[in-house]
Image (spheres, grey):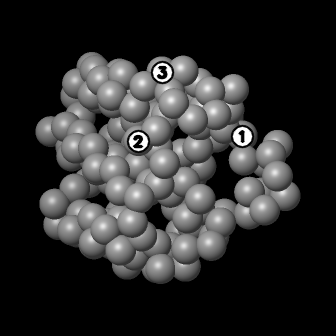
């Protein structure tokens, strides 16, 4: 069974509480439950990690080397300026799908640039929590090829 590490960045743990008009009303735990259901349906083993701390996210990415087959990451605000997370993603040489619940390209100008996506296999944004399910399907397709 292929192993996926799903990493939620800062403030994702407040989904369902913060900016419901942008991120929806489904809670963090409800989203994770749906991710795990879809993962099992696809025959994937997914571990979920969340941190509001850049260093913890980097440590988790680095720990994926040799342990996981792919990474799905929502870097949150770190998307726009964390070259350290970008470098960590590049260093593990795994398929990586970046996901954002909102369409970052339709929001404030500073959100339009992702410094992490150039080292990712692809990016999914604008589909709310269902973007995570799309990311799981994308990873499965990548790993099956």
In the picture provided, is 126 more to the left or to the right than 100? right
State the SS at label 1. Answer: loop
Q: Which residue is mark 2?
A: 13
Please tell me which of labels 3 and 2 falls first in the chain. Answer: 2
Depicted 105 relative to depicted 90: above or below? above
Residue 121 visible in the current orientation: no
CB atoms at circles 2 and 1 under 8 Å apart?
Answer: no
Q: Which residue is mark 1?
A: 103
Choose top left, top right, bottom left or bottom right for residue 141.
top left
Alpha-carbon distance for marks 1 and 3? 17 Å
State the SS at label 3. Answer: loop
10 Å neighbourhood of mark 3: few (<14), some, or many (≥20)? some
Q: Residue at x 59, y 59 (%)?
A: 77
Say which of marks 1 and 3 sits in front: 3
Q: Residue at x 65, y 66 (%)?
A: 80
Q: Disc number at residue 26?
A: 3
Q: Residue at x 22, y 44 (%)?
A: 47
Image location (x, y in percent) of residue 130? 52, 25
Alpha-carbon distance for marks 3 and 2? 11 Å
Depicted 140 relative to depicted 70: above or below? above
Choose top left, top right, bottom left or bottom right for residue 116.
bottom right
């Amino acid at each position: 069974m292929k192993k996926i590490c799903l990493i939620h960045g800062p403030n994702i743990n407040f989904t369902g509480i913060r900016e419901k008009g942008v991120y929806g009303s489904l809670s963090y735990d409800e989203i994770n439950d749906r991710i795990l259901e879809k993962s099992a349906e696809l025959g994937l083993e997914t571990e979920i990690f969340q941190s509001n701390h850049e260093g913890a996210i980097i440590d988790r990415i680095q720990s994926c080397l040799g342990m996981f087959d792919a990474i799905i990451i929502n870097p949150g605000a770190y998307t726009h300026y964390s070259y350290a997370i970008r470098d960590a993603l590049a260093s593990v040489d795994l398929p990586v799908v970046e996901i954002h619940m909102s369409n970052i390209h339709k929001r404030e100008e500073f959100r339009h640039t992702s410094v992490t996506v150039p080292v990712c296999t692809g990016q999914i944004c604008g589909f709310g929590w269902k973007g995570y399910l799309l990311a799981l399907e994308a990873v499965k397709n990548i790993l099956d090829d």
